[in-house]
């Protein structure tokens, strides 16, 4: 079902004739004829998963709607490929998927990196598939396409302390969501402990921003297990030593750092948990291990609905992915449409202002309605979608 309870506009499944791997595309909603949503690749990716992600993208676009901004909110969409991104055949599958989806990408669907894929890899495969760009469908909506494309290219070339601005934008938003929540609760940054699942693009950037704000990162999990230190991990050392998939170099660990099983991050003695890697990782079964006060969803759909209900009953607040991790998508469009330039300081300031305002609106609505933050986010979307449709039109 789409964000307003109706079926998605387009839902299809593709089968690779070479390997038998399957891929999915769901366009939940079009605004001005265009939708936005990344492409993920993971073993076990399902149509149901992609449908939920596409619905979430519709919400993210609506939540960042600003009638005074140049950025025009798009509809929501998502792509997914059921294939291990580490498999030798993965790149060929990706290229053939993009070639098969070329008519949609050319006209209706703007896409980019998501779980299991990097933007460089998507760009390379898109070129081989005959596409001008993975976001070319939005070009007709731009006032000056050449200037906009150059501005985005320049932004992607910006690095901050060795990490690309495009890799930092989303984590900046997640970190600001944490900080805004702590501020509303009157909780000081210093001494607040954080445990993360994932040190890839989103998790790594989130860890950096939170550590630099004075929070203590006490546990980080990757595919090999959990690394923990109650006194705080050396985030910068871990970032320098991670591989392209976010796996940490264990030779970089310090005395006092300990290696624990993969799920140990869930039960870490911390105030904040940040699942920043995979979907459906917090379940009804394992949520009982969590003692944190807040779970901040940097990944897409990491907390299953039944687990969220059980957590709420125990007084644990889940800040939903549709708000928390929306900074990456918004940064792309703010830059492309010209609300911000190719400058890290300007980008971070804009992300922080926007995310803080959005978190404040969501938590205020939740308090007023006596609801969860997720229900409040849905209510905000329900309020905004008719306004967007009235101004720009929509297609179902």
Image (tube, rainbow, N blue to C red):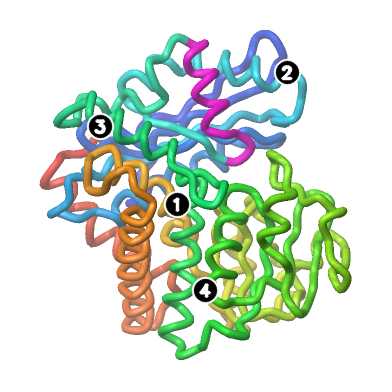
Q: Is residue 128 above or below residue 279?
A: above
Report crowding for label 2: few under 14, some 14 to 19, many 20 or more residues within 10 A (C-alpha).
some
The residue where tag 3 is placed is 148
Closest to the camera, between mark 3 and mark 2, is 3
Pick out the residue farthest to the front.
Answer: 161
Residue range of the region highlighted in magenta in the rendering: 115-129
Measuring from the top left, give residue 351's x and y in whole percent: 36, 59
Q: Disc number at residue 156?
A: none
Q: Earlier in the sequence, mark 3 or mark 2?
A: 2
User: Relative to 308, is 361 on the left or the right?
Assistant: left
Q: Measuring from the top left, give residue 50's x and y in whole percent.
A: 53, 39
Local secondary structure at mark 4:
loop
Residue 5 seen in render: no
> In the rendered image, is residue 171 in sight?
yes
Of residues 217 and 272, the one drawn nearer to the viewer in this rendering = 217
Q: Quadrant of the N terminus?
A: top left
Give the Cα separation between the discs numbered 3 and 2: 35 Å
Residue at the image position 61 percent from the left and 55 percent from the top: 204
Kindly identify which numbered label has been placed on residue 213: 4
Asked if marks 1 and 4 touch (Cβ < 8 Å), the reply is no
Give the residue pinned by disc 2.
89
The magenta stretch spans residue 228: no
Question: Which of labels 4 and 2 is toward the front?
Answer: 4
Q: Earlier in the sequence, mark 1 or mark 4?
A: 1
Q: CA distance from mark 1 to mark 4?
A: 16 Å
Q: Which callout, 3 or 4, points at the residue further toward the start of the chain? A: 3
């Amino acid at each position: 079902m789409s964000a307003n309870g109706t079926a998605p506009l387009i839902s299809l499944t593709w089968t690779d004739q070479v390997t038998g791997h399957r891929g999915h595309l769901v366009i939940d909603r079009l605004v001005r004829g265009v939708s936005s949503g990344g492409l993920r690749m993971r073993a076990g990716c399902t149509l149901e998963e992609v449908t939920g992600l596409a619905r979430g993208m519709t919400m993210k676009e609506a939540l960042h709607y600003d009638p005074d901004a140049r950025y025009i909110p798009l509809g929501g969409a998502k792509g997914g490929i059921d294939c291990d991104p580490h498999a030798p055949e993965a790149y060929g599958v990706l290229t053939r998927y993009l070639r098969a989806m070329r008519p949609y990408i050319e006209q209706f669907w703007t896409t980019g990196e998501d779980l299991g894929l990097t933007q460089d890899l998507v760009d390379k495969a898109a070129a081989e598939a005959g596409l001008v760009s993975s976001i070319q469908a939005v070009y007709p909506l731009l006032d000056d396409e050449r200037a906009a494309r150059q501005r985005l290219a320049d932004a992607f070339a910006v690095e901050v302390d060795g990490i690309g601005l495009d890799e930092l934008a989303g984590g900046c938003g997640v970190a600001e969501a944490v900080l805004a929540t702590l501020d509303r609760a009157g909780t000081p940054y210093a001494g607040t402990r954080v445990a993360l699942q994932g040190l890839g693009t989103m998790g790594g950037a989130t860890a950096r921003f939170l550590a630099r704000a004075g929070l203590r990162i006490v546990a980080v999990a990757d595919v090999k297990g959990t690394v923990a230190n109650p006194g705080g991990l050396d985030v910068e050392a871990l970032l320098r030593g991670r591989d392209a998939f976010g796996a940490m170099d264990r030779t970089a660990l310090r005395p006092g750092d300990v290696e624990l099983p993969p799920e140990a991050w869930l039960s870490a003695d911390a105030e904040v948990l940040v699942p920043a890697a995979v979907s459906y990782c917090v379940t009804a079964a394992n949520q009982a291990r969590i003692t944190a006060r807040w779970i901040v969803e940097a990944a897409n759909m990491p907390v299953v609905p039944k687990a969220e209900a059980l957590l709420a009953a125990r007084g644990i607040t889940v800040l939903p992915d549709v708000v928390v991790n929306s900074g990456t998508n918004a940064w792309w469009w703010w830059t492309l449409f010209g609300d911000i330039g190719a400058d890290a300081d300007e980008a971070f300031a804009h992300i922080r202002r926007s995310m803080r305002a959005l978190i404040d609106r969501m938590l205020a609505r939740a308090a007023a309605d006596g609801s969860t933050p997720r229900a409040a986010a849905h209510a905000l979307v329900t309020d905004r979608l008719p306004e967007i449709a009235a101004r720009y039109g929509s297609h179902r």
